Image (cartoon, rainbow, N blue to C red):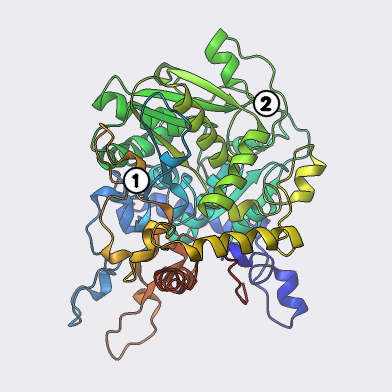
Amino acid sequence: GVKYLSKVYNSEWLVENGFDAPAEVDILTEASLRTAEAEAEADANDSGAESLPSSATDLSGPSSLPECQIHADLADSPLPKVDAYHYRDLVGDTPLVDLSHLVDNTRCRVRVLAKCEFFNPGYSIKDRIVQNILNKAEAAGRLRKGMIVVAASSGNTGASTAMMCAMRGYKCIITTSPKCSKEKMDAIRAYGAQLLISPSGAKEGEPSHYMEMARLLALENPNLYFDMDQYETQSNPEGHYLTLGPEIWEQTTGSITHFVAAGSTGGTISGTGRYLKEMNPRVNCVLADPVGSIFTNYFRKGEIGTPDKFLVEGVGKGSIPGAMNFDLIDDVLPVTDQEAFNMCHRLAREEGICAGGSSGLNVHAALQLATELSEPAIIVTVMPDLGVKYLSKVYNSEWLVENGFDAPAEVDILTEASLRTAEAEAEADANDSGAESLPSSATDLSGPSSLPECQIHADLADSPLPKVDAYHYRDLVGDTPLVDLSHLVDNTRCRVRVLAKCEFFNPGYSIKDRIVQNILNKAEAAGRLRKGMIVVAASSG
């Protein structure tokens, strides 16, 4: 749906094309607030347990969920059980991809692995903390039916909160800054939340700053508003301690030596770092920090200092959040906006990974660390969110140039020089045996089901490092989850299950990855597609 925010989820486009648009969300009207207050008060007078969503009692994250989540009213159904989930239960268990072939280090063997956190239901790492914060608040009775959830967010926590509030039946208000990408703002609105944007130039601590807007709103009526308070609550790092840390430990079979992650709230590096250091105190936690953030200066000198402008979203800060624990951080690596954005474009053009700006920042820092090491190591970082959320910024050449950055070179394959080079490469390859030039995946025509569990880059085969559960990004096609939508069925005559495959969990976020993979694999195996040739495709998108 993120691909259609300008159409399907855009009210103006719908009306212009003759469709009915959903009602505008305005939770702060007097009538809406009176209704919410009445519901919250009534729920507070009840025992509370009945009104909690079924997921509220699970505080340990997705790792403790049973393999098959079937809607409760189908428990006595004569239909057989199936391997299907509620969409909300797909948080976590994200794949680990191998980027070791990008490492420039001739002194020792180093692996760089990255968690694809955009494979979470809300396409970002923030699903983990939002799930934990809401679960704990519901279980403790601090969040009840009728209450309004309020969250200050640079974008991803807001989208995750809006999504999970839609799942659980809460009204939701998100406050953010003008720095937030249009795509993330539109996604928040698409989930039915009300979005409040702070004025441009508002400084942290001022009432007009988006963080203060949420805090002050929640203080107006604590019985009506529940503040996610992601920057201060310890439920934030706990969400990563319970899920991301154990996943990384298991996927690397306990062999991780370094964890690299940027911080905004500090929850990712603090929660994950705490778990990893409990398992092995020698694990190094390295904070990747955008130049302009105060974290680097605070870590090195113990001084907060004055923040400067930086444009990578969702990382860095101008104050020290309560969720950040510097005692767990061993080093800080500053990264410029340009370096982060360059890495985003490199990942997209060389690896087929379209990830957000913070992903570029994290991967750049991880690769920089890898070049500096003198002993074998396994470095794990995170790619926090989807690049499709930044098509109007990070992947927009006009925006990059307007903000003083170098934009990637325009692609023009049909120039005479480019065509001559391609023809020469294709002719040379045709004269070879052919086998050497085929990608390693070309011989596999049966799809991902036949792939071994661990795909490690070929030049690391003789590495003394232990094997890990990591994949090449191209090998993640298929094996998409099946979700249960049976509760939407309006049929009182018989029990019917409706299940849907989430094909947007493919690497290219669509079902088309399956056919493209097969077409290219077969063409390579048959020698019809060789190195130097240009692939042409007619497509609706």
Q: Is residue 533 visible?
A: yes
Tell me the quadrant of the picture where the N terminus can be found.
bottom right
The residue identified by callout 2 is 205
Eyeballing the image, is 297 above or below 261?
Answer: above
Q: Amino acid at mark 2?
A: Gly
Q: Position of residue 448 (x, y in %)?
A: 33, 64
Residue at the image point whose x is 59% and y is 40% from the top: 343
In the foreground, 467 or 49: 467
Quarter location, residue 190: bottom right
Eyeballing the image, is 480 above or below 108?
Answer: below
Dot 2: within a 10 Å radius of its alpha carbon, few (fewer than 14), some, or many (20 or more) residues?
Answer: few
Q: Position of residue 157 (x, y in %)?
A: 53, 45
Residue at the image point whose x is 66% and y is 43% from the top: 176
Q: 35 left or right of 116? A: right
Q: Is residue 531 visible?
A: no
Identity of the residue furthest to the right in this view: 402
Distance in Å between CA atoms under marks 1 and 2? 51 Å
Instruction: Determine the secondary structure under disc 2.
Output: loop
Q: Position of residue 475 (x, y in %)?
A: 38, 58
Quarter location, residue 154: top right
Q: 320 left or right of 463? A: right
The residue identified by callout 1 is 458
